[in-house]
Amino acid sequence: MSALDFAPFDVGSMLNSASTAKCSSPVAASVADLDDFADWGKGADFRGFQRVRAGGVAEVAAVAGVETSTRPWSAPLAAFAEAPRPQFIVEETWDELVWEAIQVDDVWGQQALDLGWDQHDLFGCHPTPWVADGSRDGLVALIVSLKSPVRITAVETDCITLQPISGPPMRFRSRKPAGQSLLWTAYSFGSGP
């Protein structure tokens, strides 16, 4: 099954297998804590990503499995992935934010673009990201802010379905809030309190 296929999954078998599915991690997790959800698919990939994070966007893209893209957000996302961590964000959260942005673009970016989703829907955030109110979060910022691992299971014209490790699916819908910024602008060099 490819990452673009939608299929219900058995959470119990996901927890007891060495799945390679793409999914998010808890925001507050340290690198050592990532083993708690490694069976759900991301732990080893994310640790590999963290090890080469300082090596530049080409190495990060290779670890994440990203191919060269022509989507409108390709160039700013590549620069964002290579940018140094702002001082106002802890390293684990920064790595998670960059990881999720790359994964969303790599696995779902083209399908989302084809269905009418734009860079604000996927990569939007509050213009002052240290103000964690979530009111202007796009998909990536939302995924990183959640306390439980989730995976994207479907992208449709009106919603993106997120499946938490337990519980019912969640639906993300385009909101286009006033004053929304993009990750690569809000987290750029010189931003911060």
Image (cartoon, grey):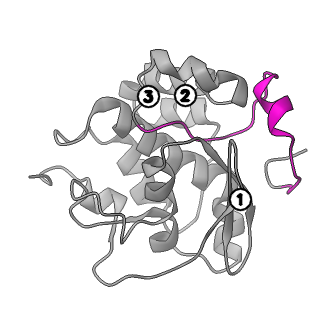
Main SS, magenta region, reads loop
Disc 3 versus disc 2: nearer the observer:
3
* Residue type pointed to by label 3: Ala
Q: Which mark is residue 29?
A: 3
- Point out residue 59 in the picture as x, y percentages from the top left corner: 50, 29
Magenta-tinted stretch = 5-27
Q: Nearer the viewer, residue 11 or 48?
A: 11
* Quadrant of the image occupied by residue 90: top left
Q: Is residue 177 above or below residue 73?
A: below
Q: CA distance from mark 3 to mark 2?
A: 12 Å
Q: Which residue is mark 1?
A: 169
**Which of the two discs, 2 and 1, sits closer to the camera?**
1
Disc 3 is placed on an element classified as loop
Image coords of residue 87 (percent x, y): 16, 38
Give the Cα separation between the discs numbered 2 and 1: 24 Å
Q: Which three-letter amino acid code belongs to the residue tagged 1?
A: Pro
**How many residues crowd around disc 3 within 10 Å: few (fewer than 14), some, or many (20 or more)?**
some
What residue is rendered at 26% in x and 57% in y?
Answer: 129
On whether residue 23 falls in the magenta region, the answer is yes
Q: Secondary structure at mark 1?
A: loop
Q: Secondary structure at mark 2?
A: helix
Q: Residue at x 54, y 78 (%)?
A: 174
Percent x, y for residue 80?
Answer: 36, 49
Left or right: residue 4 versus residue 116 is right
Q: Are marks 3 and 1 in contact (CB under 8 Å)?
A: no
Q: Which residue is mark 2?
A: 46
Q: What residue occupies the far left of the structure in this picture?
A: 193
Sequence-wise, the earlier of marks 3 and 2 is: 3
Residue kind at label 2, given as amino acid type:
Phe
